[in-house]
Amino acid sequence: MHKLVAHRSVTTQTIPPDIRELEDERLLARYHGGVSIPPRAGLPAA
């Protein structure tokens, strides 16, 4: 999550709305304690 905070130039206190937006767009997947980039159909897992 710290990389996302740095990339978006926000703080850990203000990142939750950004995470929800990215999750709604299926660009991130949330889990307890962090986020990850979900695997895309047809693409190899990173």
Image: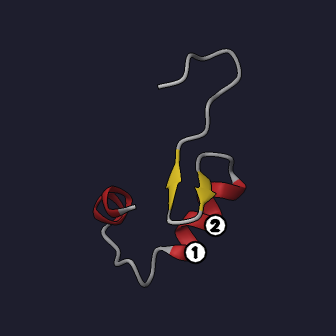
Spot occupied by residue 34 in the image (x, y as percentages of width and height)? 49, 61
Q: Which residue is at 34% across, 78% downward? A: 11
Query: Which mark, by number, is residue 8?
Result: none
Residue located beneath label 2 in the image: 20
> In the shown orientation, is residue 24 left or right of residue 14?
right
Residue picked out by circle 1: 17
Residue 8 figure quarter: bottom left
Judging depth in this view, the residue of 18 and 43 nearest the camera is 43
Q: Residue at x 40, y 61 (%)?
A: 1
Given contact means CB atoms under 8 Å apart, are the residues at marks 1 and 2 in contact?
yes
CA separation, marks 1 and 2?
5 Å
Measured as percent of width and height from the top left, residue 6 is found at: 28, 63
Number of numbered discs present? 2
Q: Residue at x 71, y 57 (%)?
A: 24
Q: Position of residue 5 (x, y in %)?
A: 35, 66
Q: Amino acid at mark 1?
A: Pro
The amino acid type, in three-letter code, at marker 2 is Arg
The x and y percentages for residue 42 are 68, 15
Secondary structure at badge 2 equals helix
